[in-house]
Amino acid sequence: MTYGYPEQWKRHLTTGEAIAAEIRLGIIKGDIQAETLLTENQIAKQFNVSRSPVRDAFKLLQTDQLIHLERMGAQVLRFGEQEKRELYDLRLMLESFAFSRLRSQDTQPIAKEMKKQLEMMKVAVQFEDAESFTKHDFEFHEAMILASDHQYLRTFWNHLKPVMESLILLSMRRRMLEDPNDFERIHRNHNVFVDAVENKNAETLRQAFHLNFDDVGKDIEGFWLR
């Protein structure tokens, strides 16, 4: 099993984006510790590239708030449990708002897309493919965001996406190794999301949020959009 950033995901990335993806995954996984100093020369040598794409990578990682650019290089910032919870809080706020905009729409096409992604997630589990599972899980949740037809909502979602993607990938890799039976629960919980969208039921969506995110987002009720 591959433990770095998936090679197939790099195909449509620039060199700088691919370097940022590898470093991002290392920081979130904990392989690159907080307060570590990364230099352009060091990273350029590690990835066998010039310093220009490394500078591009550093800018992306600073946008993610994973590093702080300094005169001598880039210092890695802390990414621990608090940062994870805050990130999930923002994600839940965005999904909740997206759902609130769907109530005036025909949600059947959205539910159909979510069902399709869920079936692909099940296939990925059968083949122990954490990378494919992560991709389809993200597209499952993104269906609501895209259907909301809200420019700034999409902008904020895309801003969170690189770090969220790495978090989910690491979680799914670990789960497939340590607790593969838990995916049955995950599939059931995602069905609750589909039911909520299909029936435009806010209470069902609230239940889905609790089922999926109580372990990381303790303040679900606090930002629920009624």
Image: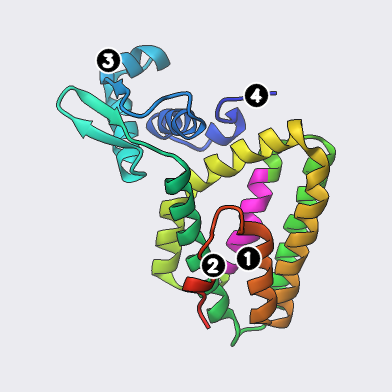
The amino acid type found where label 1 is placed reads: Phe
How many numbered marks have been drawn onto this rendered protein structure? 4
Q: Decide if residue 197 is on the left or right side of residue 50.
A: right
Q: On the image, numbered disc 2 is attached to which residue?
A: 220
SS under mark 1 = helix
Give the mark nearer the N terminus: 2 vs 4.
4
Q: On the image, numbered disc 1 is attached to which residue?
A: 209
**Magenta part, dominant SS:** helix
Does the rendering let one see residue 149?
no
Q: Decide if residue 162 is on the left or right side of residue 77.
A: right
Residue 110 versus residue 123 in the image, above or below:
below
Q: Nearer the viewer, residue 23 or 207?
A: 207
Which quadrant does the N terminus fall into? top right
Q: Residue at x 48, y 67 (%)?
A: 93
Q: Residue 151 location, x and y as percent?
A: 41, 69
Q: Residue at x 75, y 32 (%)?
A: 178
> Foreground mark, 2 or 4?
2
Number of the label disc, if any, that sits on residue 2: 4
| Label 4: how many Cα within 10 Å (few below 14, some 14–19, many 20+) | few
The amino acid type found where label 2 is placed reads: Ile
Q: On the image, numbered disc 3 is attached to which residue?
A: 41
| Label 2: how many Cα within 10 Å (few below 14, some 14–19, many 20+) | some
Q: Decide if residue 42 is on the left or right side of residue 184.
A: left
Q: Nearer the viewer, residue 68 or 79?
A: 79
Q: Residue at x 58, y 80 (%)?
A: 102
Q: Quadrant of residue 19?
A: top left
Which region shows up in magenta?
Answer: 134-146
